[in-house]
Amino acid sequence: MDRKAAEKVMVAKGNQYDIRDVAKEAGLGYGTVYHYYSNKEILLREVMEAGLAIAAEVTGQIFASHESPVQQLESYCNALLQTWMLHTSVYLVYKAASENYCNLDEMFRQQLSVQFQHELYKPLAECVERAMEAKEIGVQLKAESLSNGLLGSLIGSYGIYLYHQEMPPDPSIITELLLRGLREGKGDNR
């Protein structure tokens, strides 16, 4: 079954979706979808695991580059937005993290939280810390606070476009606006 239908339903209905909703969106019979996913938790787990794998690959590539920390942040934000446009499952991973994985069973919640923290959040926070140490960011907050604000702003900004089904022609404008605020603390308005 095409996971895109499930992702679209999950975005539209949140955790209130049903396997029947996914079947309808995919143009399949309920029995066909139920054959592969006997409940929505199995489907959700598959979507989230796929999203985590893609996000970890993107994050690893960006933060392994030889760019300066603030350039890595810019590349990261742009890559994240582009990846969300191509793979809604990745956006759903970040959105679930921002909501503290509400409505997920406890074992899956813990698994997602550990993976998200280790593979996605920690590299971002470390990059923010390096940018602060290099004085590329002029805002004087804890790296975790800046990382939370950056991710929250990206998730919220992208979500507005996604829920209205109207993507910006160039999502890098979101990155530019967010990073300008971090740089302006230093007086650099790039």
Image (cartoon, rainbow, N blue to C red):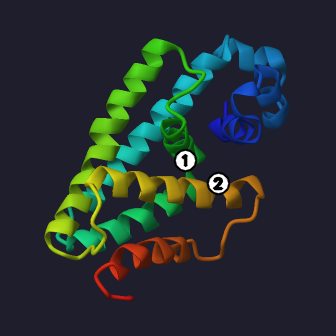
**Could you tell me the amino acid type at mark 2?**
Gly
**What residue lies at 50% left-to-right and 53% top-to-bottom?**
152
Sequence order check: which comes first, mark 1 or mark 2? 1
**Does 63 sit left or right of 171 as displayed?**
left
Q: Secondary structure at mark 1?
A: helix
- For residue 21, which quarter of the picture? top right
| Image x and y of residue 25, in percent | 81, 36
- For residue 133, which quarter of the picture? bottom left
Residue 60, can we see it? Answer: no
Residue 62, can we see it? Answer: yes
Residue tagged 1 = 91
| Image x and y of residue 153, in percent | 52, 59
User: What is the C-alpha distance between the residues marked 1 and 2?
Assistant: 9 Å
Residue tagged 2 = 159
**Does 80 sit left or right of 187 as displayed?**
right
- For residue 160, which quarter of the picture? bottom right
| Image x and y of residue 187, in percent | 32, 87
